[in-house]
Image (spheres, coloured by chain):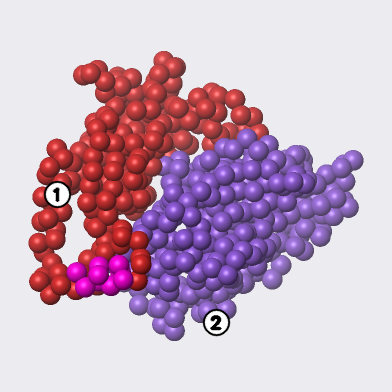
């Protein structure tokens, strides 16, 4: 690990005033410390925000919920209000990592976690545009099992590894951030970037901005939702493909739908055409098979991950069927 | 145990050349002029030295730490608490699992300096007055290990698992996360909740049996 300066921040304003170009905020550390051990991240300064009071989980006026950026993943998944009003979020969080890691990892850190692409994680690989802009992409001609089938570029085919963020995308979360200039909000759909020509940028967060909370609007999906995760072992493994689904069903008719995919793109991937396909219809396996096909329209797989197109399609059908009660 | 600590951190400093030492002093002075918090004091050659207070297995300690020191390395290298094991050192195996304020974490991915004021329990702190913790006794009775390397992490993890289940924490295999009552620990629940601890000998059947037995005894409170 490279040497670094270490500062403890007492509050969010203190933290954002202490940040500079080569500094990083340290929360749970489960991703950052790992990447520092690998030499992928080499910050000159860490600003420890673990004692900043941003861990509350509180109801919002109007029925939503504010989840503190520093609430631990385990506390978020197990909070009674999250479990009752946003069970999709609980399920997605519990699908990820291990109990030990979820006890350390924070919600803000989950949003900020970096790809698990092995060509990014290991500095022995010379070509990674995310790690060394302009150096190329070893994954383009490498092992592609864990890589993107949507929204990739010639510069980067990495995926965002989160489960939690897939649910946040389906739940229309809003990210609250603080900087020395004040506060602002970023819709979940605008938070993570596609790689394009600048894969070194994972998010639209500015360098001096700190995530303070995640706001969830009131959700009509609690009664009909599911998170499906397909992976190479039964637990404690990143997704090949995952699907977060929420259905708003009234009188036997689907009035609203959210379908979001994980493990397939540089950000959580909303399958909006599939959502449209089920609106106004009654839950049925045939309908969900149509939606599954719509969800993977436009997929662009690579030689090493062509199987993920069919896998994503089936995951959508399974999640919709479970959520819609026709499984 | 405590006095050795300042010795060891002095030893680390001894590796720094005289030129680097002077740079460090210069940097500290510069920092003070700029009005930065006194906690940071570093330059190109070294990490900050950070004052960190920890309670470890019931005993208070005060350290002056290189900021890079993980909780795992602090326990093993500075305190000789070598029960906690370094397996992968990347949060992938669980051999380094300890309890922090009663909650299980991977000590390899956590900087010791970020735990100021925390209460740490390692495998050495599970037994009480020469009597094994019920989870330890259950692992022996059910052959929950072979080589034993992962066992300290498995034990700390299992102790925390039991308190999580009593609190009603859900897992990935919990049928309905909306139900918040205490969890009935089926073998499937135990396997999922222990999945953060890898055993390369494959002692999993014994581990599951041991956790099941400990849960039926209704014992195994953290720390």
At numbered mark 2, what does the secondary structure look like: helix, strand or loop? loop
Mark 2 vs mark 1: give the one in front.
Answer: 1
- Residue B217: x and y in percent read 41, 15
Query: Chain for mark 1?
Result: B
- Residue B207: x and y in percent read 36, 29
Viewer-nearest residue: B163 or A154: B163
What residue occupies the far top of the structure in this picture?
Answer: B217
x 28%, y 43%: residue: B53
Which label was assigned to residue A197?
2
Question: Residue B41, relative to residue B164: is it above or below?
Answer: below
Asked if the stretch drawn in magenta spans residue B26, the answer is yes
Judging by the rendered image, the residue that carries numbered circle 1 is B6
Give the magenta range: B25-33
Q: Quadrant of the N terminus of chain B?
A: top left
Chain in purple on the image: A
| Left or right, residue B120 beside residue A281 | left
Q: Quadrant of the C terminus of chain B?
A: top left
Chain B on-screen colour: red
């Amino acid at each position: 690990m490279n040497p670094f300066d270490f500062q403890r921040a007492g509050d969010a304003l203190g933290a954002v005033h202490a940040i500079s170009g080569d500094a990083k905020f340290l929360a749970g550390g489960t991703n950052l410390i790992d990447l520092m051990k690998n030499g992928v991240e080499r910050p000159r300064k860490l600003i420890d925000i673990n004692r900043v009071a941003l861990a509350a989980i509180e109801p919002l006026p109007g029925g939503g919920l504010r989840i503190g950026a520093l609430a631990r993943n385990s506390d978020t998944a197990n909070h009674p209000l999250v479990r009752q009003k946003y069970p999709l979020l609980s399920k997605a969080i519990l699908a990820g990592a291990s109990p030990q890691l979820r006890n350390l990892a924070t919600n803000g850190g989950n949003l900020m976690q970096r790809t698990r692409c092995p060509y990014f994680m290991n500095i022995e690989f010379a070509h990674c545009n995310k790690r060394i802009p302009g150096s190329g992409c070893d994954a383009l001609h490498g092992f592609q099992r864990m890589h993107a089938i949507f929204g990739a570029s010639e510069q980067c085919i990495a995926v965002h590894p989160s489960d939690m963020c897939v649910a946040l995308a389906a739940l229309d979360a809003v990210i609250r951030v603080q900087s020395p200039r004040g506060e602002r909000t970023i819709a979940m759909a605008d938070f993570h970037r596609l790689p394009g020509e600048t894969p070194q940028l994972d998010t639209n967060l500015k360098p001096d901005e700190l995530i303070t909370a995640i706001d969830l609007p009131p959700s009509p999906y609690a009664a009909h939702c599911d998170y499906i995760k397909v992976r190479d072992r039964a637990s404690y493994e990143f997704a090949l493909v995952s699907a977060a689904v929420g259905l708003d069903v009234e009188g036997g008719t689907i009035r609203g739908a959210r379908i979001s995919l994980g493990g397939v793109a540089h950000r959580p991937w909303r399958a909006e055409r599939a959502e449209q396909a089920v609106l106004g219809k009654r839950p049925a396996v045939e309908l969900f098979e149509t939606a599954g096909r719509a969800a993977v329209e436009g997929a662009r797989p690579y030689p090493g991950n062509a199987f993920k197109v069919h896998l994503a399609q089936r995951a959508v059908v399974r999640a919709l069927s479970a959520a819609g009660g026709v499984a | 145990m405590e006095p050795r600590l300042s010795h060891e951190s002095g030893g680390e400093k001894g590796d720094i050349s005289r030129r680097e030492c002077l740079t460090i002093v210069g940097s500290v002075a510069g920092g003070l002029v700029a009005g930065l918090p006194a906690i940071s004091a570093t330059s190109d050659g070294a990490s900050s030295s950070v004052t960190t207070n920890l309670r470890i297995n019931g005993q208070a300690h005060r350290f002056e730490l290189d900021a890079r020191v993980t909780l795992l390395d602090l326990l093993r290298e500075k305190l000789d608490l070598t029960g906690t094991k370094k397996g992968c050192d990347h949060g992938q195996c669980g051999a380094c699992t300890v309890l922090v304020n009663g909650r299980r974490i991977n000590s390899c991915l956590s900087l010791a300096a970020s735990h100021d004021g925390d209460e740490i329990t390692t495998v050495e702190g599970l037994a009480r007055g020469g009597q094994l913790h019920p989870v330890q006794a259950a692992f022996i009775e059910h052959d929950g290990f072979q080589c034993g390397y992962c066992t300290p992490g498995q034990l700390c993890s299992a102790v925390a698992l039991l308190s999580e289940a009593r609190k009603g924490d859900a897992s990935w295999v919990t049928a309905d996360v909306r139900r918040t009552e205490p969890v009935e620990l089926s073998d499937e629940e135990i396997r999922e909740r222990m999945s953060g601890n890898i055993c390369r000998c494959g002692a999993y059947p014994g581990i599951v049996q041991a956790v099941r037995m400990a849960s039926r005894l209704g014992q195994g409170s953290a720390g």
